[in-house]
């Protein structure tokens, strides 16, 4: 089994992050290999920084906190985590832990195959289990966006926005140093970069507990995510992903 770095980007997560850290601490308490949990505080203003510091102080385990002075976006937070990660496999998870530790176990099984370089969760797979599915309008908008993504930049990848992704360390370092999009479109960009670099991408069924208080604003964020697709194509023409 491989050693693991788990990256958790956090922006104003004071209400949710404690339970996520408790769950991960319990999961890793009997983990047979080295691990680290890196929390990246993305300019929170609600006490997230203090809460995480107190948690680290009062719990046994390999946890660290990176603070960004201002809110830079989830993509930048994950990028900073990747830059500081040291273990064999790098996984990033949302602060609400909508993708629980059982998904980590499954991904590590996949990485026993030496050909596996990137594992991405896919909520559309038959074996996936979704608890508390999102509202109908959000599901419809997600399907439309997925079709646009597959048509414009990522043929064959039907769930680029799944919040569970895992990488071999060398792959993650190469991908994230080329990242230019730091908000919601970053998921698409990292997969596009991975494809341009010729990495093997394997989809995996996931268990997902959908957060009822999604941070995505359906219309304003959807427009930005749509324009990001054209930014990615333009970046490719400029040679930024070589």
Image: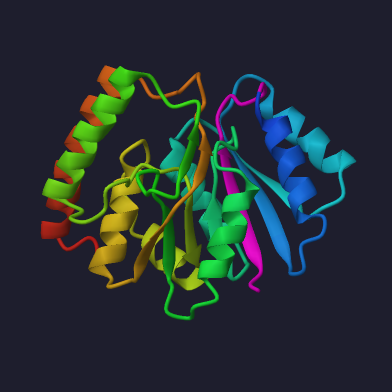
Q: 238 above or below 145?
A: below
Taking the magenta stretch, the answer to whether it contains residue 61 is no
Where does residue 70 sit, x and y in percent of width and height? 51, 31
Q: Residue at x 45, y 23 (%)?
A: 215
Where does residue 21 sit, x and y in percent of width and height? 72, 40
Observer-nearest of 57 and 198: 198
Q: 228 above or below 190?
A: above
Where does residue 180 sit, x and y in percent of width and height? 31, 49
Q: Residue at x 26, y 65 (%)?
A: 195
Where does residue 154 sit, x and y in percent of width and height? 21, 53
Taking the magenta stretch, the answer to whether it contains residue 3 is yes
Q: Residue at x 47, y 51 (%)?
A: 79
Q: Residue at x 71, y 62 (%)?
A: 35
Query: Is there any visible trace of residue 18 in the rendered image?
Result: yes
Q: Is residue 46 left or right of residue 173?
A: right
Observer-nearest of 231 and 129: 129
Which corner quadrant holds the C terminus? bottom left
Rendering colour mode: rainbow
Query: Is there any visible trace of residue 177 in the rendered image?
Result: no
Observer-nearest of 50 and 132: 132
In the image, which residues are magenta?
1-15
How many numbered marks are there?
0
Which corner quadrant holds the N terminus? bottom right
Which residue, as the protein is rendered here, is positioned at the far bottom? 114
Q: Quadrant of residue 223?
A: top left
């Amino acid at each position: 089994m491989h050693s693991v770095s788990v990256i958790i980007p956090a922006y104003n997560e004071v209400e949710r992050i404690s339970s996520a850290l408790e769950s991960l601490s319990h999961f890793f308490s009997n983990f047979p290999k080295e691990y680290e949990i890196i929390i990246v505080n993305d300019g929170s203003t609600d006490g997230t920084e203090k809460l995480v510091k107190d948690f680290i102080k009062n719990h046994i385990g390999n946890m660290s906190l990176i603070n960004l002075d201002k809110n830079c976006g989830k993509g930048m937070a994950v990028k900073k985590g990747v830059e500081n990660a040291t273990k064999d496999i790098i996984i990033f998870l949302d602060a609400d832990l909508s993708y629980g530790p059982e998904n980590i176990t499954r991904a590590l099984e996949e990485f026993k195959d030496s050909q596996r370089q990137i594992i991405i969760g896919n909520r559309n797979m038959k074996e996936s289990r979704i608890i508390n599915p999102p509202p109908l309008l959000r599901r419809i908008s997600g399907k439309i966006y997925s079709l646009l993504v597959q048509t414009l930049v990522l043929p064959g990848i039907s769930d680029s926005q799944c919040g569970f992704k895992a990488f071999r360390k060398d792959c993650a370092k190469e991908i994230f140093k080329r990242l230019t999009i730091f908000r919601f479109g970053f998921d698409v960009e990292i997969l596009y970069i991975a494809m341009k670099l010729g990495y093997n991408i394997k989809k995996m069924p996931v268990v997902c507990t959908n957060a009822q208080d999604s941070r995505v604003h359906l219309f304003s964020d959807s427009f930005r995510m749509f324009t990001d697709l054209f930014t990615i194509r333009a970046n490719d023409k400029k040679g930024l992903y070589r």
